[in-house]
Image: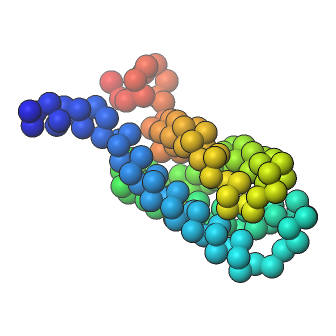
Amino acid sequence: MRGRFAGAYDRHGEKLRFLVVGGWNTVFALAVLWVFDRVIPYDQSSIVQKELVLVASWVVSVTQNFLTFKFLVFRSRGHWFREYAKMYVTYSVTFVIQSVLTLVISEALSLRLFWANLPTIVVVTIISYFGHKYFTFGEPRRPGCDSGQEG
């Protein structure tokens, strides 16, 4: 029985770590957004001001996510600055998608940003896993090598 679990973890451990650490990162990001939504004064009717609150909370969350994904999930030994920059590229895509969805939900249902953000998490989780696995922390492919590893 133990061998079966070990084999499953060998095949899917990274995905499991991504979900667990990603769960923590999501709670952290939501907490940051909740605090910023309450502490930073902004006009609820201003989309620009709402977006500024989202951007501020995003910057804090991306930095924390980078550290947990680098060390705990993908266990990367890559260049810090390069991976941190790639993290922003990956999260820029998900941020635009999540922001648009959050703003649409907020406006359509007259919800605060925190509550409007919750339904967007599933979509962003899937996109970010593949973005981080293959782009942010992915090994650069070498010419003439299909697996991305040296022959």
Horizontal arrangement in the rendering, residue 101 relative to residue 8 (left or right):
right
In the image, residue 135 above or below residue 34? above
Image quarter for residue 125?
A: top right
In the image, residue 12 above or below residue 78? above
Of 133 and 82, which appears nearest the observer? 133
Residue 88 visible to the viewer: yes
Q: Position of residue 16 (x, y in %)?
A: 35, 43
- Can you name the residue that lies furthest to the front here? 109
Image quarter for residue 42?
A: bottom right
Q: Residue at x 59, y 47 (%)?
A: 121
Horizontal arrangement in the rendering, residue 114 relative to residue 72 (left or right):
right
Residue 92 visible to the viewer: no
Q: Position of residue 46 (x, y in %)?
A: 91, 64
Total numbered labels placed on residues in the image: 0
In the image, residue 49 above or below residue 107? below
Q: Position of residue 80 (x, y in %)?
A: 49, 58
Q: Residue at x 31, y 35 (%)?
A: 12
Q: Quadrant of the C terminus?
A: top left
Of 90 and 4, which appears nearest the observer? 4
Q: Residue at x 51, y 40 (%)?
A: 129
In the image, residue 46 above or below residue 40? above
Of 53 and 132, which appears nearest the observer? 53
Of 89 and 148, which appears nearest the observer? 89
Q: Position of residue 43 (x, y in %)?
A: 88, 72
Horizontal arrangement in the rendering, residue 131 relative to residue 146 (left or right):
right
